[in-house]
């Protein structure tokens, strides 16, 4: 049977994996919500279907029956985990699934006052968004335990890469340096996410949980400083977090202060990052014209 990847939410991170597997001859299909996004993805050669809790997914059972690998990056909503709420049955009945990946977030750990966390640590989410992620992880892993679904959970740190990085915000004059001494969090380049997912597919271990972050947790203000150094411009002034006019998503990053260990993915998956720290990643983006 031809290998195939179905992505619930063919977004930024999923596309990095999808492009690699499509180049290797895999059939890649997925979902999106907005008509414009669906059209853009189809223009790139992907088979895309609309998916939402309200719209349902009458097409999904037939699609999943001939799928070997599934990746879900759709976040939980106020009602729960939409993919499982609508499609847990068809997923569990699929006879050809070798691997299922669920993209979660390191936000499930909450804050550790700058200390380290790994996959065995207690989950203490600080925000409602992260609490929903904890519940979603449990729902996916329960299907593994009770129905044998080959689920793997990936807790992603702050994602950056082409089109989504501090270089663009510094150039646009929208970058902020938040005055929170000692505030640390982890990051991951989108292409290194794809590397981790590929490695997991090659070494499937259902029930496994992996932190997906680079080797160099750092203070956000330091990252902005480094970009300004690369661009030869003055960094923006330090501002208190309450005066920074951050989005809800951005605020959630500043609720937590921790260093995330990625030792498990190195040891179990043998992963070597292209961008092991933010400096390497930013330098490569700048060299590519980002």
Image: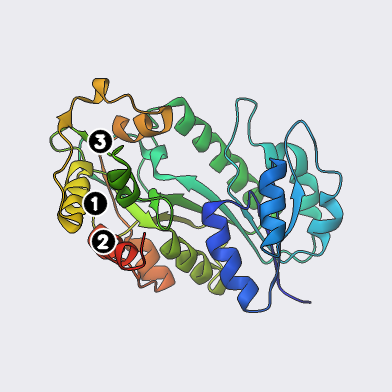
In the depicted view, which residue is nearer to us: 42 or 30? 42
Element assignment for label 1: loop
Q: Residue 47 in the image: state x and y as whole percent.
A: 75, 60
The residue lying at 40 percent from left, 28 percent from top is 247
Reading the image, the residue beneath label 1 is 217
In the depicted view, which residue is nearer to us: 193 or 210? 193
Whether residue 207 is visible: no
Q: Residues within 10 Å of mark 3 (few under 14, many from 20)?
A: many
The residue lying at 71 percent from left, 73 percent from top is 3
In the depicted view, which residue is nearer to us: 95 or 6? 6
Reading the image, the residue beneath label 2 is 277
Q: Nearer the viewer, mark 2 or mark 3?
A: 3
Is 172 left, or right, of 230 in this rendering? right
- Location of residue 41 with respect to 201 vertically, above or below: above
Q: Earlier in the sequence, mark 2 or mark 3?
A: 3
Residue lying furthest top = 242
Q: Nearer the viewer, mark 1 or mark 2?
A: 2
């Amino acid at each position: 049977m031809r290998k195939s990847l179905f992505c619930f939410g063919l977004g930024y991170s999923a596309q990095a994996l999808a492009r690699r597997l499509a180049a290797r001859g895999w059939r890649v299909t997925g979902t999106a919500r907005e008509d414009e996004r669906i059209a853009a993805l189809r223009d790139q050669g992907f088979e895309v279907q609309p998916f939402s809790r309200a719209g349902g997914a009458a097409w999904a059972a037939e699609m999943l029956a001939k799928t070997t690998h599934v990746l879900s990056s759709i976040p939980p909503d106020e009602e729960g985990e939409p993919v499982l709420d609508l499609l847990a049955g068809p997923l569990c009945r699929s006879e050809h699934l070798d691997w299922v990946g669920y993209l979660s977030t390191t936000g499930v750990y909450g804050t550790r006052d700058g200390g380290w966390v790994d996959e065995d640590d207690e989950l203490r989410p600080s925000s409602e968004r992260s609490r929903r992620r904890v519940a979603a992880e449990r729902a996916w892993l329960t299907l593994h335990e009770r129905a044998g679904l080959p689920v793997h959970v990936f807790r992603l740190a702050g994602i950056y890469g082409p089109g989504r990085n501090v270089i663009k915000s510094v150039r646009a004059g929208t970058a902020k340096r938040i005055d929170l001494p000692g505030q640390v969090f982890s990051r991951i380049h989108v292409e290194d996410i794809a590397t981790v997912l590929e490695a997991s597919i090659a070494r499937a271990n259902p029930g496994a949980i992996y932190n997906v972050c680079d080797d160099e947790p750092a203070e956000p203000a330091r990252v902005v400083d480094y970009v300004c150094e690369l661009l030869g411009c003055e960094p923006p002034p330090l501002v208190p977090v309450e005066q920074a006019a951050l989005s809800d998503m951005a605020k959630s990053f500043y609720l937590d202060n921790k260093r995330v260990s990625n030792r498990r993915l190195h040891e179990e998956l043998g992963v070597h990052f292209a961008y092991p720290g933010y400096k390497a990643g930013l330098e490569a983006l700048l060299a590519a014209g980002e």
